[in-house]
Image (cartoon, grey):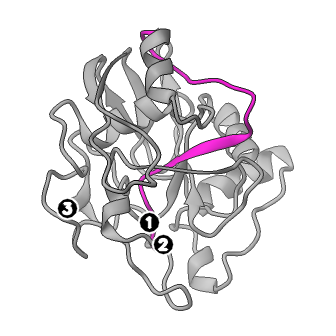
Amino acid sequence: MKTAPRSTPSGLVWIPGGTFTMGQAPIFESEAPNPPHPVELSPFWIGAHPVTRAEYSVFAEATGAAAPPSAGRPELDAPDRPVVNVSYAEALRYCAWAGGTLPTEAQWELAARGFDGRRYPWGDDPPDERRACFAEDWNRGGPSPTGAHPAGASPFGCHDMAGNVWSWCLDAFRADAHLERTRLGRDPCVGGATRVRPLRGGCWRSIESRLQSAYRNWSHEIARHTTIGFRLCVSTV
């Protein structure tokens, strides 16, 4: 079994293995498919919070990697905010340096909602300002400091899995991902030639329905945006 990677300020949360029901019935006709389907996962570690600016700065200084572009306002570039404007490849490089990788969609969803099929990380009640950073004004809003909404934590103690910043996931983004996971079996990571990657969790701009743990969004892997961040995952297999 792998041990936890190097220590980071945000820490890691242990997610036990098992089978859970991933997905739910769609809300919108245009929503990317994620119908209910069983997925079996081995135990893994995942970041308790999204990777912060401070954590990414340590990586940049240690490796010579470029710092991400400014988020546009000084308060949004504070060390305790989620790092944003990081592409999929840049997020992967950070994770490899830290001893892990990005979570698969299945790992992310289990860490967000647990084994009981809850709609949001905290349960089935709709989001509010105590639980998540969302529905912010484009010109005046932005991500909150990580961990600023403890009432919104997942059943395993993961913070900011609804709102704040979208999270890159490791898989290729495919409409038939649920079928591919069934074919792959345990610990699925959906592959494909596409350079489009899944995003999960909603962001500080999202309406409340996008914060649901089963909701799938996507972006091209070269994208850098003030609404997109990531978190570290470490497998045990």
Residue behind mark 2: 143
At which x and y percent is residue 160? 37, 57
Question: What amino acid type is highlighted by mark number 3?
Answer: Ala
Residue drawn where x is 39% and y is 63% of the image: 163
At which x and y percent is residue 89? 75, 42
The correct choice, above or below, for 56 with respect to 40 in the image is below
Q: Which residue is at the front of the view, 60 or 231?
A: 231
Q: Which residue is at the front of the view, 143 or 4?
A: 143
Asked if the residues shown at circle 2 and circle 1 are in contact, with their CB atoms under 8 angstroms apart, the answer is yes
At which x and y percent is residue 20? 25, 24
The correct choice, above or below, for 197 with respect to 170 in the image is below
Q: Is residue 179 magenta?
A: no
Q: Earlier in the sequence, mark 2 or mark 3?
A: 2
Residue drawn where x is 50% and y is 14% of the image: 2
Question: What amino acid type is highlighted by mark number 2?
Answer: Pro
- Residue 151: give its label: 3
* Label 1 residue SS: loop
Residue behind mark 1: 164
Q: Main secondary structure of the magenta part?
A: loop
The correct choice, above or below, for 155 with respect to 138 in the image is above
Query: On the rendered structure, is 174 left or right of 133?
Result: right
